[in-house]
Amino acid sequence: MSQRVLVLNSTYEPMHVCSPHRAIVLLLKGKAETVEFTGTTMRSERTVLPVPQVIRLLYYVRLPRAESRKLSRHAVLARDGFRCQYCGGTRHLTIDHIIPRSRGGTTSWDNVVTSCASCNTRKGASLPWEVGMLPLQRPRPPLPGDFVRATQRVVPEAWLPYLGLAIV
């Protein structure tokens, strides 16, 4: 069973992606409820259980604030949907400081974007408006759905209402 299950916090905030087996264990232990089903079943010797596609925890799990999440290359790429924020390309991705460090820019969520190698080289140590290369989206701290989306090549249709602004 290769499909994955979206796990929501009790507040319907996307938290995690797990296997169907783990989701069923959470359901059987009374720690979660099913929000969306896949339409398939999982069988044991005595029971047939519907396989969930989205589950919601019945208790609140405190997550770190987005601003305090560790800034990493993978997190920036996930936040930006694995697309260059200057040309929209998806190959040879790097990280670019909008205001270059050589000009006093910081390594923060508001100053770092995904860039392909050619755009990063073309921009160099210039400010974006000096070379006419403004980012497609304003950089921001990541949303929880950004990390969920980063784990999936294809996001199931049933997940879209729960990922909110994370899907572009």
Image: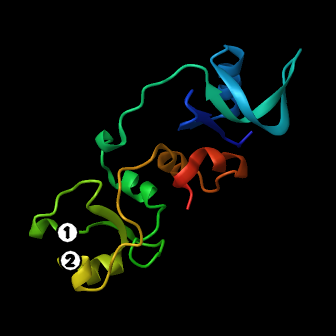
Q: Which of pointers 1 and 2 lies earlier in the amino acid sequence?
A: 1
Q: Name the residue rendered at 69%, 51% in the picture.
A: 156
Q: Residue at x 72, y 33 (%)?
A: 35
Identify residue for label 2. 127
162 left or right of 44 in image = left
Q: How many marks on residues?
A: 2
Q: Secondary structure at mark 2?
A: loop
The location of residue 123, given as percent across then percent down, is 26, 80
Query: Toward the viewer: 26 or 165?
Result: 165
Looking at the image, residue 65 lies above or below residue 150? above
Q: Secondary structure at mark 1?
A: loop
Crowding near the residue tagged with mark 2, few <14, some 14–19, many ≥20 C-alpha atoms within 10 Å: some
Left or right position of 95 against 130: right
Q: Position of residue 93 (x, y in %)?
A: 39, 68
**Vertical comparison of 68 with 117: above or below:** above
Q: Quadrant of the N terminus?
A: top right
Alpha-carbon distance for marks 1 and 2?
Answer: 6 Å
Q: Nearer the viewer, residue 162 or 92?
A: 162
For mark 1, does the 10 Å Cα neighbourhood hold few (<14), some (14 to 19), or many (20 or more) residues? Answer: some
